[in-house]
Amino acid sequence: MDKPEPVTAPETPARPAGFGGWLAANLMPLAFVAAVVGVIIWRDLDVVPVALAVLGLGLVIFIHELGHFLAAKFCDVHVETFSIGFGKAIPGLQFRRGETLYKVGWIPLGGYVKMVGEGENADTEEADEDPRSFKNKPVWQRMVIISAGVVMNLILGCVCFMVAYSHGVEETPAVVGGVAVGSPAWQEGVTADTRIVQIDTITRPTFDDIRPTVMSAAKGQGVLFRVRDRDGSERDLSLVPRKNPDDLYPTVGILPVEQLMLQKGRKGVPAVRKNSPAAKARATQDGSEFQGGDKVIASSFDPTNPGAVKPIGPDARDPAKLDASEFLRNQHRMRGQRMTVRVDRGGTPLDFPVDPAFTRHLPGVRFQMGRLAAMRGTGPAARAIPVGAPGEQGLEMAQLEVPGSGDRIIATEVSANGHTLRYVEESDKEVPGVEQVRFDPLKLGYDLEKWFEDPKNAGSRTSG
């Protein structure tokens, strides 16, 4: 009788010895990690947000693969490997418990659950004979295992949703903080402080409801906006979204209430515009520059006393924020003068003297007044008629599809106390009692404001 041949354990490949061997075995994952670090350095990204993104992605992957793993164990399927990430395991993050190898791979772009009888192992002899093979399980069990990952992600989403809303979610009130000049909302007379009480069929809207509703409107179709004006009266507006060539999507020109906090940008990106007066300003306390996260809390407000600084009050439209409109009004009052801006930086107040910025002219270049682009439908310009010819057609706006259409301002005349000043594009023949000044299109609005603010010009009138 022949003796049975001795059974020998399968050979295991020899593990590379020393640091050089370990480096050779992990060359590809190490190269991937080095590439990621290189991108972070090249793009000057903040490491903390990148790390949080990786952890968040890892959590989603873990929950997904955990669903497959638990379902496989429930159906008594032989699981060989449970891995989060691809590639070789990170040193110290691999262990075996029972029949399953648990590990975390170098490349955090996915994960997998390796089962007998599934994937590349589906056609092996072991998969055919093992009663715990995936392929030998009933169809319903295989469907449960396959769909368990998606189900677990849905459960994770519901849990995160409940946790987030249990702590409160900040929503922007549907209050108009500003209106883009010339936009459909501007033409219909919508102003800051207007409250939106209905958007299309949404009766309790937030500001975040505006964009999706406007973007879903058909071309040329108006969107219903029911607004409550400052005096408490309500009116319905049909705003037709408009998309200019430079716009990414159609808009109606309604802007949210601003927050008086400097935007936090990427590392190395300044919080203010380069070469602007704000970029040159330095805090009187420590000589520092404006930084992202600085919160404006006070500013100069009196042109006759530029050194006086007044705190900015809360915004009546959104009491959680300071009134950005008040700050803009202070800027308007202080135009042409140095203005002190006080910010709160981590509980420490800092004062920044900011010099005024004036319009720069290109040497030898003078701009021409453009065509009339937009008018408020309820404003004085819409009711204007030609002087000496009542009843005739009023001002005409330009149309994008009609080149050369629309009126163009060539002169603006203001009068007070028997003195008439005419801002003209080109000098005309002299008229007795009328002073002519050539205007600059970029400064005409400023010049008119300064003229009307002069006390000696009280009771003035304007024509153009």
Image: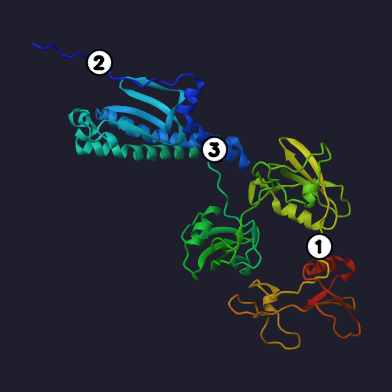
Residue 165, horizontal then vertical, whole percent: 49, 40
Residue depicted at x 74% and y 47%: 312
**Which image quarter holds the N terminus?**
top left
- Crowdedness of circle 1 by 10 Å Cα count: few (<14), some, many (20+)? few
Q: Which residue is mark 2?
A: 8
Marks 3 and 2 sit apart, C-alpha to C-alpha, by 45 Å
**Which image quarter holds the C terminus?**
bottom right
Q: Which residue is mark 1?
A: 360
Q: What SS does tag 2 mark? A: loop
The answer to whether residue 309 is visible is yes
Tell us which disc is closer to us: 1 or 3. Answer: 3
Which amino acid type is shown beneath numbered disc 3? Val
Residue 286, horizontal then vertical, whole percent: 81, 36
Between discs 1 and 2, the one toward the N terminus? 2
The answer to whether residue 206 is visible is no
- Residue 12, placed above or below residue 265: above
- Crowdedness of circle 3 by 10 Å Cα count: few (<14), some, many (20+)? few
Left/right placement of residue 179 relative to residue 327 reads left
Q: Which mark is residue 155?
A: none
- Residue 302, placed above or below residue 68: below
- The reply to whether the C-beta atoms of the residues labelled 1 and 3 are less than 8 Å apart is no
Marks 1 and 2 sit apart, C-alpha to C-alpha, by 89 Å
Which amino acid type is shown beneath numbered disc 2? Thr
Which amino acid type is shown beneath numbered disc 1? Arg
Residue 242, horizontal then vertical, whole percent: 56, 67
Q: Which residue is mark 3?
A: 36
Marks 1 and 3 sit apart, C-alpha to C-alpha, by 44 Å
Left/right placement of residue 279 relative to residue 13 reads right
Q: What SS does tag 1 mark? A: loop
Between discs 3 and 2, the one toward the N terminus? 2
